[in-house]
Amino acid sequence: MDEMTTLKNFRPDAPACDRARLVPGRQRLLDAAAAQRRRRRFWPRAGWKLAAAGAAAGVAVAAVLVAQVMPTNHTHRVEAEYATSPEPADGQWLYQKTLTRQSTLNFRDDLNPVPEKGAPAYAEFTQETWTQYGSGKTRRMLMQGGLDSVVGKAVAGSPKELRRKVQKLPSEPQLLLRSLSKIIRHGGDYERIAYTFSSADTIPFEVRISLFRALETIPGVVVRPQLVKDALGRPALAVHPTDDNSFTRQTHRREELLLDPKTYEYRGERTMMLAGGVIDSKVTTEETLISVSAVQRFAAAVDEPGVRP
């Protein structure tokens, strides 16, 4: 299937909304998303608030017995690996497109999102980014058109540096975790693996398997037995820390890493409001989807930001 066509034609029959009414909320969401991406470049997902919870919370999480689920045979080979291309030149740019399906709840604070009357249940936003292979400089397309200013390097270096470090990761889980801690020095084992999946432009299939195996050895990490869907409707594994952690207990929000169930390619992220959270002054009795993204990476690099492959 041509996923770009799917993205372009996503929900073509959705009713038009009153732009004047939705613009303020939309801008708040875009600003928050941009701030989150900026934080992620300098800290492995500042939204991974588990790191801030400290060692005590980590011990508490480790004490929880979590059933691990293995969705596929690690040794199997997929019939069609994703397209590959020659390694980009240092001056070339990697293109990435992200579709985010965001609830139109108006968040007064983390525990009290309020539905906007007359608004559709979800709004959809597309973010395009270009990252220079050799330097790690990043540009993004602004909502009104044109590119923003250059954003600095990521914590693990340029895509070139990260790609070469990831390719050398050992397959044994504990050795892999120790090696990764030397590449990404912030956060814990789960945060480092999640950052690797979301930031490395290319991860060999064998390394993806090793990263997934290592995830399973981390105390308090859950691989959900039921597949979920990313913002493009593609099936995905949802992986996340157990809900018994400081951030989730305080906010009733769970942040999930989404992976392809067969190839373990990075698919995006999902945020859920858990039962017991408060929406429009009412305590929720079931999980509520707050946002879900779908990330598309392209094998072909381009010569300058703003150009699409």
Image (spheres, rainbow, N blue to C red):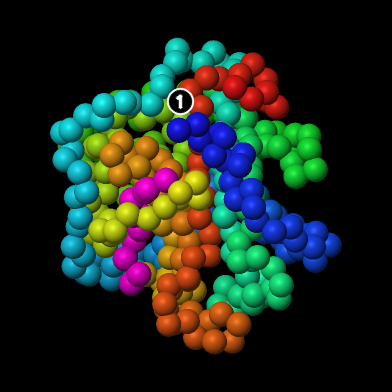
Q: Residues within 10 Å of mark 1 (few under 14, many from 20)?
A: some
Residue interval drawn in magenta: 234-244
Q: Is residue 150 visible in the rendered structure shown here?
A: yes
Above-or-below relation of 97 to 65: above
Per the image, the residue denoted by label 1 is 161
Mark 1: secondary structure: helix
Q: Position of residue 211 (x, y in %)?
A: 28, 40
- Front-most of 182 and 164? 164
Determine which quarter of the picture holds residue 105. bottom right
Above-or-below relation of 247 to 298: below
For the residue marked with disc 1, what is the amino acid? Glu
Q: Position of residue 179 (x, y in %)?
A: 29, 36
Above-or-below relation of 128 to 165: below
Residue at the farthest bottom position = 282
Which quarter of the rendered picture does the N terminus lie within?
A: top left
Q: Position of residue 22 (x, y in %)?
A: 76, 63
* Residue 236 drawn in magenta: yes
Q: Position of residue 171 (x, y in %)?
A: 20, 33
**Residue at position x 56%, y 26% from top?**
94
Which quarter of the rendered picture does the C terminus lie within?
A: top right
Residue at the farthest right position = 20
